[in-house]
Image (cartoon, rainbow, N blue to C red):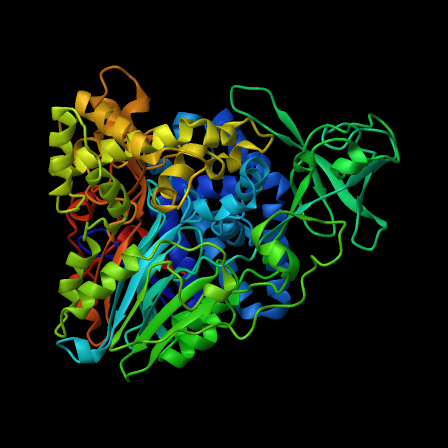
């Protein structure tokens, strides 16, 4: 069979083959050609081996990946997939074969391999599952439970609600569905943008997959076959957002060493055995072994990997207070140990480790879907992350539902770290049926707010993005696909109200501060890149955040913790204050903090040293790269690779805008999170669909398609989804006979 790879004017691969398996091979081949460096970084991250070529900065993640047993979970899930769904397993194998065929040439084109002395490795059949798991294991934000423990420990349980908001470690999205009664074509339109950490190359890959069974355009995750999150088959289209569900639990463990006497947590004594105290009051064997993490330009690190009946121990805790005793518990309660229970080992329980299922059986049925009912059935097999799904077809079918696997367990499990040795924290099956939403007056909006997923979650995004989108969509009944770009770029910041309300009550200000106050009170509350008022507001907001975080009543939350580095974004006080600022300013009382005085001091501070430019001067894109972008080297006179972000464009938007380009007020104006893609699916006329990604189709620095979509993404422009094969150019380099 001949596999054909075509490209449109933006370098997007359009793949055509004789069947689904040949097509999966072509997808792996094309992805390896375009994204070889990205694929290898993700493979190593899934295995916990990235520090071997990225250095000590990657050690924290590698340690977590090893202790959480990500690669082993992926391997188990693939073995189970072969047993339960051999067709999908063979399809995944074909993708992996394509990756392995394309990697040598792809690596030759990618200068990063030479820069770190890395040769491309071999992908295993379970590697795509490992990539998926590593990409999403922190997606539900289970480290937020560590934060709640700290809040309770320092401020008490009543304080938890003050900080309940969309925190710095979560990822969300906008998405909306407009039915035919609100469009000019009489057919539905689905549009939106997933919000993630912006990475270069991008976390989404524009692609088309065509064979006699199906012809689908969509956004793929590089390293994973098919089109999982956002796709259009020609007769039905679907899209997802994060449901903000809670489906991962943390357990405080009591462990004890038996055997050679090494201490749990010190990595000593491979012959030693570990036991964990269960809810039945008995000690149960826990698996234990050590692994070595190689570190570029540094010493190798030994990591102890322990797994109890709950799951892998992802936080080892402090050292054993009983020394080398074979029978004394490690990680007991304060009563038993005479210590702090918060320093005990902590294990992670999450669905794929329990069920050996990552939901890959949904991927082929999604490609084969013809109607909404097909999409609905496919998402019945979805596992994680838990998402809100919208879909529409050409026959009038509509879908608005939650998909994924959420365990049934106690309320304490959902909110805090629970004690593994206490009864009542076991899982009792899965939440079913999954909730469904409605489409009201021809419109449905999903933006991580409380909605159909409310019974499944604890914290949700503030309602501002959803409320704003609904108001904008309600204003018209003649929408077209092209109109949706303006909604993607809306910059109204409703969350500015509490700070501006407090600002309005201030008097006895200096003349400079009074002038600043008056300017902000007349500001239109739009965070546009060219706005000086937006820059001034951001400066005042940042000063308020820093002053609140420094106040003795809250500053105790900055006390050193024993938690690993990978969890620190969820535990940093300044971001927590920044994203909970509305709640903190509106609370009836805040631990004796004089918030009027805090705001007054912040205004005087900014008035004394006001920003001199616009919001876009400091609110610049700050993408994550495994290495500095080599395409900058020829323009870098001082060889300082730390300033790559300064070369990135200024942005409009803010955390609570529809244009969600998230900075961390009080810490930085740079935007590390934002729309990782934008899409508009015209269900009636797929050829009118549109999309864009932050950089381009290629991860190769010298490719013309490496960053060619970036200017469009910054402006809010979209590029057409090409469906006419005669408008495409054949990539003869990769024409293969199978």
Q: Residue furthest top?
A: 638
Residue drawn at 16 percent across, 27 percent down = 513
Considering the image in quadrants, where does the C terminus appear?
A: bottom left
Q: Is residue 168 above or below residue 389?
A: above
Q: Left or right of 281: which side holds 691?
A: left
Q: Residue at x 68, y 50 (%)?
A: 311
Q: Outermost residue, front direction?
A: 508
**Horizontal placement of 523 versus 291: left or right?**
left
Quarter of the figure that contains the N terminus: bottom left
Q: Is residue 724 visible?
A: no
Q: Position of residue 569 (x, y in %)?
A: 46, 36
Residue occupying image coordinates x 43% and y 74%: 436
Quarter of the figure with residue 340: top right
Q: Which sits in the foreground, 638 or 113? A: 638
Please state the horizontal and vertical placement of residue 521, each as a whole percent of the image.
Answer: 14, 42
Q: Would you say residue 346 is visible in this rendering?
A: yes
Spot occupied by residue 36 in the image (x, y as percentages of width and height): 39, 42
Q: In which quarter of the image is residue 326?
A: top right
Q: Who is closer to the viewer here, 566 or 27?
A: 566
User: Residue 398 placed where, x, y %?
Assistant: 33, 78
On screen, residue 57 above or below 575 = above
Q: Relative to residue 593, is residue 639 drawn left or right? A: left
Near-viewer residue (550 or 81):
550
Q: Name the residue: 24% across, 65% down.
A: 470
Q: In this view, does 704 lie above or below 490?
A: above
Q: Count the marks: how many?
A: 0
Q: Nearer the viewer, residue 430 or 102?
A: 430
């Amino acid at each position: 069979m001949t596999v054909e790879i075509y490209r449109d004017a933006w370098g997007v691969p359009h793949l055509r083959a004789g069947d689904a398996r040949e097509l999966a091979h072509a997808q792996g081949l094309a992805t390896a050609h375009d994204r070889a460096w990205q694929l290898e970084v993700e493979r190593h991250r899934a295995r916990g081996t990235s520090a071997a070529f990225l250095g000590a900065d990657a050690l924290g993640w590698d340690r977590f990946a090893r202790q959480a047993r990500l690669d082993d979970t992926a391997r188990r899930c693939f073995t189970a997939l072969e047993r339960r769904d051999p067709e999908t397993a063979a399809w995944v194998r074909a993708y992996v074969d394509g990756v392995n065929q394309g990697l040598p040439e792809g690596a030759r084109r990618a200068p990063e391999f030479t820069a770190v002395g890395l040769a491309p490795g071999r992908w295993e059949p379970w590697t795509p599952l490992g990539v998926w798991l590593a990409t999403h294991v922190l997606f539900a934000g289970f480290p937020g439970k560590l934060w709640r423990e700290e809040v309770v420990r320092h401020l008490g349980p009543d304080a938890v609600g003050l900080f309940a908001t969309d925190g710095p470690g979560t990822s969300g999205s906008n998405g909306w569905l407009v039915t035919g009664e609100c469009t000019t074509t009489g057919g539905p339109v689905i549009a939106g943008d997933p919000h993630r950490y912006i990475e270069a190359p991008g976390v989404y890959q524009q692609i088309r997959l065509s064979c006699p069974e199906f012809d689908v355009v969509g956004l793929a995750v590089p390293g994973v076959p098919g089109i999982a999150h956002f796709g259009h088959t020609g007769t039905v289209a679907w899209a997802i957002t994060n449901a903000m569900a809670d489906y991962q639990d943390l357990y405080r463990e009591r462990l004890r060493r038996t055997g050679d006497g090494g201490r749990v947590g010190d990595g000593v004594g491979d012959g030693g055995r570990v036991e964990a105290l269960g809810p039945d009051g008995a000690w149960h064997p826990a698996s234990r072994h050590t692994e070595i993490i190689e570190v570029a330009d540094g010493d190798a690190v030994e990591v102890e990997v322990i797994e109890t009946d709950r799951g892998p121990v992802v936080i080892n805790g402090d050292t054993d207070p009983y020394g080398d005793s074979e029978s004394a518990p490690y990680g007991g309660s304060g009563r038993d140990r005479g210590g702090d229970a918060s320093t005990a080992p902590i294990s992670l329980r999450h669905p794929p480790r329990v069920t050996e299922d990552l939901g890959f059986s949904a991927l082929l049925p999604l490609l084969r879907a013809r109607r909404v009912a097909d999409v609905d059935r496919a998402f019945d097999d979805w596992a994680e992350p838990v998402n809100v799904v919208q879909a529409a077809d050409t026959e009038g079918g509509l879908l608005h539902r939650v998909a994924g696997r959420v365990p049934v367990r106690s309320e304490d499990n959902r909110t805090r770290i629970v004690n593994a040795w206490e009864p009542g924290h076991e899982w009792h099956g899965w939440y079913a049926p999954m909730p469904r939403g409605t489409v009201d007056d021809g419109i449905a909006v999903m933006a991580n707010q409380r909605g159909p997923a409310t019974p499944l979650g604890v914290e949700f995004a503030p309602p501002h993005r959803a409320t704003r989108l609904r108001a904008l969509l309600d204003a018209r009944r003649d929408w077209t696909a092209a109109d949706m770009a303006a909604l993607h770029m809306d910059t109204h910041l409703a969350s500015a109200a509490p700070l501006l309300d407090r600002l309005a009550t201030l008097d006895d200000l200096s003349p400079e501060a009074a002038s600043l106050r008056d300017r902000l009170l007349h500001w239109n509350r739009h965070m546009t890149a060219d706005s000086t008022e937006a820059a001034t507001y951001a400066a005042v907001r940042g000063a308020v955040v820093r002053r609140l975080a420094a106040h003795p009543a809250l500053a105790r939350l900055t006390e050193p913790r024993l938690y690993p580095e990978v969890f620190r974004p969820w535990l940093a006080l300044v971001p927590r204050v920044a994203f909970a600022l509305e709640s903190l300013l509106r609370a009836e009382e805040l631990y004796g903090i004089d918030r009027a005085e805090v705001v007054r001091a912040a205004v005087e501070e900014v008035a004394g040293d006001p920003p001199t430019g616009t919001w876009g001067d400091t609110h610049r894109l700050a993408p994550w790269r495994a290495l500095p972008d080599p395409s900058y080297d020829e323009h870098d006179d001082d060889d300082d690779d730390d300033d790559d972000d300064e070369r990135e464009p200024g942005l409009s938007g803010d955390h609570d805008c529809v244009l969600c380009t998230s900075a961390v007020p009080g810490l930085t104006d740079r935007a590390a999170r934002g729309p990782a893609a934008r899409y508009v699916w015209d269900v009636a006329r797929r050829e009118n669909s549109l999309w864009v990604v932050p950089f381009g189709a290629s991860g190769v620095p010298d490719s013309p398609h490496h960053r060619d979509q970036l200017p469009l993404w910054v402006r809010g422009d979209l590029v057409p989804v090409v469906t006419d094969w005669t408008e495409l150019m054949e990539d003869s380099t990769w024409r293969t006979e199978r």
